[in-house]
Amino acid sequence: MIKRIGWGTLVGALMISLGLPWVFVLQGLPFNLPTPTAQLWHYPGIASALRDSLVVGLVASCISLFIASIIIGRDATHGKPKTNDVGLTFAAPHLAFAIAFLWLFTPFGWFDRVLPFALPWFEQQSLVTLITILVFKETPFLVVLGRQQLAQLPYRQWILQGRSVGTSAQRSWWLIVFPAWLKAMRLVLIAVAIYTVSVVDVAQVTGPLNPPLLAPLVVNWQLQFDPLSQQLAEQGTWLLMGLAGMMALWVIAQELVLRCLMSARVGRVVAQSYEAAVALATSIIRRASLIALLGVSTAACIALIALTFARGWFYPSVLPLEWSIASWSAHNDLLLQRLGTTLSIGLVVAVLATMAITALREWQRHHRYEINDAWLLAALFVPQLSLVVAWLHSDWSQWFSNDTASVVMAHFWFSFAYGYLIYAPAERAVPQTHLTLGRSLGFGYWRSWWWFKRPLLTGALAHCLLVTLLVSVAQYVPTLLLGAGRTPTLTTELVALSSGGEWQLPAMFATALWLLALVSLVLTQIISKEPEL
Amino acid sequence: MLVRYLKFIVLLALTSITAAPAVATATKSDSAPTVYFYAWGGSESVNSYLNWVSEEVAERYGIQLQHVKVADISEAVTLLLSENNESDSKIDLLWINGENFKALKAAEKLLSGLPEKVANSRLLRNDLNWRDDFGEAVDGQELPWGIAQFQLVFRAHVLAQKAPPVALEPSELLQLAMRYPGRFSYPKPPAFHGTSWLKALAYELVREPRELQKPPGLANSEQVLQPLWHYLDQLHPYLWRSGKEFPGSAAQQRQWFNHGTLDNAVTFNPNEVPALQQQLRMTPAARAASLGSRALTNFHYLAIPRSSGQQQAALKVLNFLLSEPAQLRKSALDGWGDPMVINAPQGAAKTDNGTLFPSHEEPHGDWTTVLEQQWLQRYQQ
Amino acid sequence: MISQATQIALSDQCLTWRQDGRTQSLPDMNLTDGASLGVMGPSGCGKSSWLRCLLGETLSYVQFSGRIAIAGKDVSRLPIEQRGIGILMQDNPLFPHYSVAKNLAFALQRQGLTKAAQKQVIETQLAELGLADMAERLPGQLSGGQQARIGLLRTVLAEPALVLLDEPFNALDAERRQQVRDWTFNFLRERGIAAIIVSHQADDLSLVDQQLYWPDIAVEQPCEARTK
């Protein structure tokens, strides 16, 4: 009886905390659809904005999936998967990476100044630059999470079986493991694809502006207060949600097509020369991608650190007028304060979210009832600024009158979706037998979970903590607006500083964020590697 | 073991975040009220000036001034517009002007009667027309904090044949653009500086500049602005990326200017070039020029939300910001370099000598939307 | 399409356990005309690892050296897919996300058949096993015994000279176990395919032609001593 109340209360409280924000959204989000006669369609350049957003979404998510598959394929077919090859890029904060990338690789940028010959550099505010940067950031994300999903599959056995009936290792990866991996990655891929069409800061800094992509356009409208802009913002929000839905469908369609393609190739005769050519090509692509990821991230990281010490670094100089540690010594108090707030909120959010995700999975397992993932991941489908503005116009603040609680709640809500994305598939792959066995030995449910099931999920839990932490750390709009500026973090500081025309101070905060993420990632990898009980 | 460790982390984090607001409220209820000042945080010189102000008001009045840095003050306006409580706004003081002020005034969110409540408002210069903010009457709901004057910045070699102070006619600018194709640009409207560039150009180009002081009629706005669009049609092919793409803001353009991407930038701070050069934040090769013989001039302001729970403290801070020491410090070229809005104290060196140009007032407020919409219709596809 | 009976000779076999450097020699083995060899030993003694080495897998904890001759040709340096050795694993013998027909098609890709011919072969073979209507089912929809039979069929369709069976009946209940076991040995014998089966249960090996007890590492001489 007590146990039943325990479950009920726990899951009930969780469902309220996940559902309540939706009630507030419905309360605060005007139902102003972009019907064919809507004002939105008369906005100059709306067709290009929509087209470009789609192109970015499709191209960036396809290329990153392609590269990630090749990297993971090599992991699957070789004895020991690498773990640290993409860590530096994975940890890079999007905005910081974009800023450093532009500083290095645009015309008149640092490399253009150093190299004696001209190269076709990445143009400022262009679709190609934006797609490149997104691919750079999304590929490592897919690789890190993809490895985690791969580990849940009996891929070694499959490849061995494939080879024992005469299929080469590489072909076994593509024909046997890849379709199953792709299915396991569906939610992650949907999240990435939706992120790609709804990203604001990076799109604004690196993407086309005339017209901008849809997401930054909606944000621009949202921040203007004349009636027309507000109308456009309301309709644009729904259009953006539609676009997110389209991307989700696209990922599912892409998965079906790829799985059909692979299935159609089963039993097909392949010439050895063809296999050799494919092996060579994938090996070249893999090596080139890893070198590019590592090379560009290292350069970006060094550039950011250099910028924190540089005073007066102007075209056409290769080096700054002065090096100085003044900026660090003047701002280290501020930096530490912000780091403290960021970490406190981030850790609370990560622990709460991971505990909630675990509880919800166990509840579903225990009751043999699966909540449709789409409900739990819906937070990823709606543009964030629109959500937060809707909350501001709702009863949110009456429920969460404490600013910190309000921020934690919002971070928890956004982190939950990403954490669930990582933990749920891993948890589903683990049999419940050990837990049941533990209970038969007299352990209570959670004690048994801790001693017998958790060891099988150490990696998934660690990655869940990592990603929920990083999602919390990266929040700008909810932290600023729901926290009313009472909880300034590294990210709010970085975004505010980056709105100016300077490099040095933003570079400092960007470096700190990068370092924080990198340390978290390394810790996660150490924990994941812990010998399992 | 791990459980204990996790418990420890949760406890630690919970205490740290629950303790933080507790500390804040404790200090609030004591004699040191906290004033939350929402202001753009993109400039290190502005941020460090506000740091200095915080120290001063803490020492003088025992007030804790918290600078809440935002990337765009409209974020704060969004927050304030969504608040429906009467007495406990999250915002105590705001740095705004233009459209943002208009929106807050329309929503009756601002404290009025500021000139009577702020003693130092009597020091404000009488020769400045600050009572009109982008065509919107200030009505005592905000007080000017600094002067903004639209200027162009060029790489020195572009202006090599001109002696300072340089004033460029639009036709001369077009000649320069043709001589240096692909090297100039301007922030994309409706970014604040982009729209200001259109206004400044309009003043120089329209046949009857006084038309701009009146509200635009539906029929005649197209006709009035015809020379402006004609000029831009000529200019765009010689701009960066043939005028098909633009920097997103003045800050971004300044970055590109320092970075070498462009040979021009725009600014609203008449002291920006010398101040930033002195601080090694702008290339030594930069030189300022005005567009035409008169420069578009406006003000940036301070306002207090009607529902601020710390009105008295906020008024004290506002009063200090308009005081002689605060205004002098603000205009110093080794700091922010923002010109004073009060009469210079006896004996103090005037900081805006040689940098301020004769001024054009802001056009009537409704022109902003007209200019932005027509520009987008023509050039954003 | 069924393999011709071939001479299989395993000689100079040595397993080196990397952790402590101990070595373990194995007796020479000869299998002719589709004979079967049963290897008995307790769980965890290393017999599964040995099978995987024969298959060609590189293992992190043990190293294998020795000669694996199939029809007089040493295949011990060839990659797995070129050795002509098949394996049937303990559990999950099939790819769960592919239909039975697709699972079987994997084994036919070397033979240069058209899609239609492949379909024909698969249908015929399934019909012979009495599983004719299972072609489009997913492995999850089959019983354990059906899965085991189709797993073996897939192994055999790839025409190996030697099939390795690693505790192949473990997943089955006692009754089914005997049924499947009898069927398996018949099936291999009929087609003249040599087999090595490892198990810790004596019952499993009742039908094999030769039996061998896994040498006890504590008693046996290490490799070097033996070869000297």
Image (tube, helix red, strand yellow):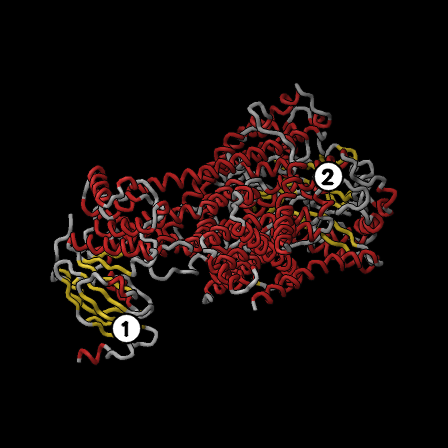
- Element type where label 1 sits in the image: strand
Q: Residue furthest front?
A: C175
Which tag is nearer the camera, tag 2 or tag 1?
A: 1
Within the image, what quadrant is residue A46 found in? top right
Location of residue A127 in the rendering, given as x and y in whole percent from the top left corner: 47, 40
Badge 2 and badge 1 in a common chain: no
Residue C16's tag is 1
Residue B157 seen in this snapshot: no
Graded by Cα atoms within 10 Å as few (under 14), some (14 to 19) or many (20 or more), the crowding at tag 1 reads: some
Location of residue B265 in the rendering, given as x and y in whole percent from the top left corner: 59, 43
Please state the chain letter of the residue tagged with numbered disc 2 in the rendered image: B
**Tag 1: amino acid:** Thr
**Tag 2: amino acid:** Leu
Please state the chain letter of the residue tagged with numbered disc 1 in the rendered image: C
Graded by Cα atoms within 10 Å as few (under 14), some (14 to 19) or many (20 or more), the crowding at tag 2 reads: some
Q: How far apart are marks 2 and 1 (CA)?
A: 75 Å
Question: Which is more toward the observer, A17 or C51?
Answer: C51
Instruction: In the rendered view, tell whether residue B209 sits above or below residue A323.
Output: above
Lateral position of residue A112 relative to residue B146, left or right: left
Instruction: In the rendered view, tell whether residue A332 sits above or below residue C186.
Output: below
Whether tag 2 and tag 1 are in contact, CB under 8 A, the answer is no
Residue A196 seen in this snapshot: yes
Lateral position of residue B211 relative to residue C39, left or right: right
Location of residue B270 in the rendering, given as x and y in whole percent from the top left corner: 68, 45
- Element type where label 2 sits in the image: helix
Residue B81's tag is 2
Question: Which is more toward the observer, A202 or A330?
Answer: A202
Location of residue A190 in the rendering, given as x and y in whole percent from the top left corner: 48, 43
